[in-house]
Image (cartoon, grey):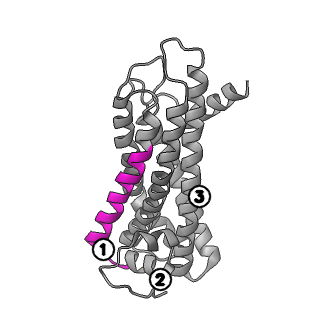
């Protein structure tokens, strides 16, 4: 299905947020370095601000680390799954080139990062008003669990919103709602698996109260993301 072309200088973030199918389709039709640089910049700024706001509760250095690692996860997930997504799409009824699948995913992540950047001020307000981290503080574990779940909830919301726009784009490219849904669900499965494991490997983002501030943990490859979320949920419920 042909998509309406837009002027090559049209890289409006507003068009990205509105999910204009014709515009997004034109952006994914061919490689435009300026558009790719814009999306990468949006991902670095939006996700970086959100990560810094979350990590600030632990320490300024942790805020810096989280502000670097969160955009890195999005970019690594987009790059790591680009080939897999390009292979899955034709099998599921949507003929996309490798370049198109990568650009579509990058656009989706740029939208998610924009939403996270908008959340950063709210998260910073919550962190500012949360009880400070103190050695042996009685509420450290509870506040840490609350911030972790806040992080997961915000990322989940941004991901849902971004993937709804991605579904619109895939539907416009395929002209078939069923094929668009199949491709989206397959892409989501791969992105969720890779993204969550990268998040676990690159932890900490908040930083545990009883552990030193560090860029990566010595046990980075032990356990998984889902176990951590489950334990935090159980702690709050108890």
**Label 1: how many residues lie within 10 Å, few (<14), some (14-19) or many (20+)?**
few
Q: Disc 3 on helix, strand or loop?
A: helix
> What label does residue 22 carry, if any?
2
Residue 23 lies, in percent from the top left, at: 44, 80
Q: Report the mark closest to the observer, 1 or 3.
A: 3
Residue highlighted by disc 3: 160
Q: Residue at x 44, y 68 (%)?
A: 104
Residue 147 lies, in percent from the top left, at: 55, 34
Q: Residue at x 42, y 24 (%)?
A: 219
**Label 3: how many residues lie within 10 Å, few (<14), some (14-19) or many (20+)?**
few
Q: CA distance from mark 2 to mark 1?
A: 16 Å
Q: CA distance from mark 3 to mark 2?
A: 21 Å
Q: Report the mark closest to the observer, 2 or 1.
A: 2
The answer to which of 189 and 12 lies nearer the viewer is 12
Q: Is residue 230 above or below residue 48?
A: above
Asked which quadrant contains residue 138, the reply is top right
Residue highlighted by disc 1: 31
The answer to which of 195 and 90 lies nearer the viewer is 195
Task: Please report whichever mark, 3 or 2, sits nearer to the chain's N-terminal start.
Answer: 2
- Specify the farthest residue to the right: 238
Q: Which residues are magenta?
A: 29-50
Q: Mark 1 and mark 2 in contact (Cβ < 8 Å)?
A: no
Q: Mark 2 and mark 3 in contact (Cβ < 8 Å)?
A: no
């Amino acid at each position: 299905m042909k998509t309406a072309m837009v002027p090559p200088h049209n890289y409006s973030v507003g068009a990205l947020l509105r999910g204009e199918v014709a515009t997004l389709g034109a952006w994914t039709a061919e490689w435009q370095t300026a558009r790719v640089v814009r999306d990468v910049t949006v991902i670095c700024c939006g996700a970086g601000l959100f990560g810094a706001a979350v990590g600030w509760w632990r320490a300024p250095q942790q805020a810096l680390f989280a502000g670097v690692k969160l955009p890195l996860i999005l970019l690594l997930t987009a790059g790591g799954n680009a080939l897999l997504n390009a292979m899955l799409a034709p099998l599921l009824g949507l003929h996309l080139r490798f370049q198109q699948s990568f650009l579509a995913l990058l656009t989706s992540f740029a939208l998610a990062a924009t939403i996270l950047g908008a959340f950063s001020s709210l998260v910073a307000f919550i962190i500012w008003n949360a009880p400070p981290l103190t050695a042996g503080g009685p509420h450290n574990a509870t506040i840490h669990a609350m911030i972790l779940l806040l992080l997961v909830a915000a990322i989940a919301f941004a991901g849902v919103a971004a993937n709804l726009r991605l579904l619109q784009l895939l539907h416009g490219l395929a002209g078939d709602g069923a094929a668009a849904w199949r491709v989206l669900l397959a892409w989501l499965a791969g992105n969720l698996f890779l993204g969550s494991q990268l998040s676990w490997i690159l932890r900490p983002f908040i930083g545990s109260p009883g552990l030193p501030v560090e860029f990566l943990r010595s046990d980075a490859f032990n356990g998984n993301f889902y176990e951590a979320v489950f334990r935090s949920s159980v702690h709050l419920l108890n």
